[in-house]
Every structure is written in C-alpha cells, then in structure tokens.
Amino acid sequence: MPEPIENLVNYSELVSVLENTRFSPIIEKLPQNFLAAFNHGDFAGWVEALRALPDIAPDSWDLQSQVRIGSTGQCDDAQRLQLKQTLLKIHPWRKGPFELFGLEIDTEWRSDWKWDRLKAHIAPLENRNVLDVGCGNGYHCWRMAGAGARFVLGVDSHLLFTMQYWAIRQFLKSPPVYVAPLALEDLPAGLKAFDSVFSMGVLYHRRSPFDHLYGLKDCLRPGGELILETLVIEGEKGMTLAPQGRYARMPNVWFLPTCDTLHEWLEKAGFRNIRLVDVSKTSIDEQRTTEWMTFESLPQALDKNDPAMTIEGYPAPMRAVFVAEKP
C-alpha cells in the first residue's frame, strides 16, 4: 500500500504548537484535508516523490552557516544518485542551496548570499517567533531557526514549494520550522503576534504595495521588527517604475520604487526607526540556471549588449533591504 499522504504532509504538529497561544487563530486557516484542498499541478507526481524518499535519520545538521542535513558517509554514491533523481521530480528548486547527505542541491538562487547581507543588521532572532512571507521552499526559515528562533512559520501560496519543504522536513523533524500553503492575505486579521516578520522578494509582485505593508504590520506585535527586501531603482524621492508588460521576463512586477520612495512608503504605513541596510545589484552568479532549475533565469533576462539593462529596456535588478519597527 502507498504511504498515505497524511503521513507525509501533516499539520497536526503545527496545530499543537499554535493551540492556546496568541497564534491560535492561524489554526483555522491551515488545510484540514491537504489532498482535497491542493490536488492540482503535478500533485500526484510530487506526492510520489515524497513517498520515494529514503528513510534516513541524519547523524548531524548545520543550520547556522548553511542548510546541511546528515553527512556524506550516511549514503553511498548509488543512494545519493537515487535521492537526487527523486528530488529532481519536485523541480524547479529556486531557493537554497541545500546539502542532504553529501548531495548538493544547487538552486537557482544563492539565497545564502541574501541571508549574509542582512543577518548582521536585524534584531537577534534568539527566542523570537518569526513569520516569513513568500518563503518559497523555506530555505530562509531554516536559517532563521539556525539563528535561534523559537518558532518559524513560512507562508507561500505555491504548492510546489510547500512540497519541497516537506521533502526537507522528512529528514529534519526537530527544529520548529513550518511552511504552509498560504498567502499573507490568508492569515487572520489583527494577529499582532510575531516578533519578526520577513518579506523578501514579494512587494513588487503585489498590485497594492501599501496593502502588503499594512498586512505585514498587522502580523507584528507592538515593537516587532519588519525585514523587507525588494527590487528598487536608482533615483530621487517620489520616483517609482511601473513596468509596462514584463520586467526581467517576469509578468507580475507592478512597482519598483527608489530607496527614498520606499522609505516614505514605510513611514506612511506607520513604521518607525526605518533603516536601509543594504543595496545590491543582482549578479548572474547569484541567480542562474542550474540542473536543479533548468528554466531561463537572470542571464536570459538581461540585454546581451548591455547587462545593466533588462531585455525590456529597464534597469537591471537591484535589491534593497530595509529594517523597520512597528510602534
């Protein structure tokens, strides 16, 4: 008999963590019947991949300097190849990298670089309750746990990324890290519960950036910290780029403000102690095609004759990180 999906994807542990806490309103938003609620895409294939993963308990792990689970000696080359072929069935892998029993998952994004750019500028995560909005497969959630967070909840509406999280979770069950197939808008209004809220690579996908900023603030407790990373452009206060059609091949990019404009947006949304802690142009070493993400990536989105511009004629991607507090 195939392994029941309830044994592979189960939020009962998360429910027990949330019960009788200020986070308990989230429980009613969690999928009660995962199969009925999310049976779309290549769901059957993703479930089969989870079922085919080997049952190996890691002898060690590292979530501080990387996301490494287990050691090379726990698998031979044939087992590692089988593990690789199984995980490639949950393609594409965008956020990472991960290392599982000596297998390197070389994802599209070097998400560890983003983490390294911001980690020294945020409030220490030790014993904090953290929300990661648009978390993808949960890579940064694991890094937050490695930084000492008490509890980490990632939300992302893309089911594929949730299934990738469950693949990793199958091997690493101990840290309090959970990823649910939800959007920010699905979370209960007036939650006011998290110590730290991350939104990285999301704001420019929102038709209403202010609704997104207010939604993030609504999830924070008073005095809590927002960590916001998004695409920006160079320019003066008040300037914003609203791409016509696609931006860097992406069809759903709505607004790219200057850093001064985004600072004003955060002020208008009611945040205080707003700091710009990093501005970095995205390189083709940080975002690129790999065997774990075989579709077109940043190199194909840039003008071949002028890599400072996208193929649509807009400034090439540049990202800023802001840190701010809720009063």
Image: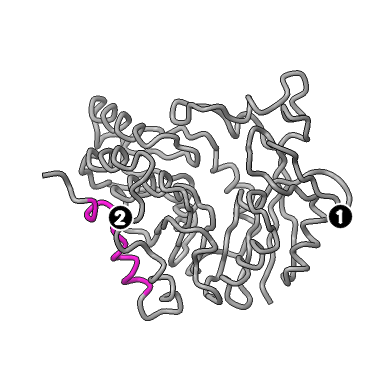
Under tag 2, what secondary structure? Answer: helix
Q: Which of the 4 quarters of the picture holds residue 84?
A: top left
Q: Which residues are magenta?
A: 5-18
In magenta stretch: residue 26: no
Secondary structure found at label 1: loop
Separation (CA) of disc 1 from disc 2:
46 Å
Kind of residue sitting beneath label 1: Gly
Q: Report the side of 228 relative to 127 (left or right).
A: right
Q: Three-letter amino acid code at disc 2?
A: Ala
Name the quadrant of the C terminus. bottom right
Classify the position of the N terminus by image quarter: top left
Q: Residue at image x 64%, y 61%?
A: 212
Residue 8 shown in magenta: yes
Please report the residue visible at 34 percent of the width from the left and 66 percent of the height from the top.
14
Please tell me how crowded label 1 is: few (under 14), some (14-19), or many (20+) other residues with Cα within 10 Å. few
- Specify whether 179 is left or right of 122: left
- In the image, what residue occupies the spot 78% across and 50% down? 257
Q: Is 37 above or below relative to 130?
A: above
Residue lying furthest right: 236
Magenta-drawn stretch, dominant element (helix, strand or loop): helix
Q: Which residue bears the numbered disc 1?
A: 238
Q: Residue 182, position in %: x, y?
A: 46, 58
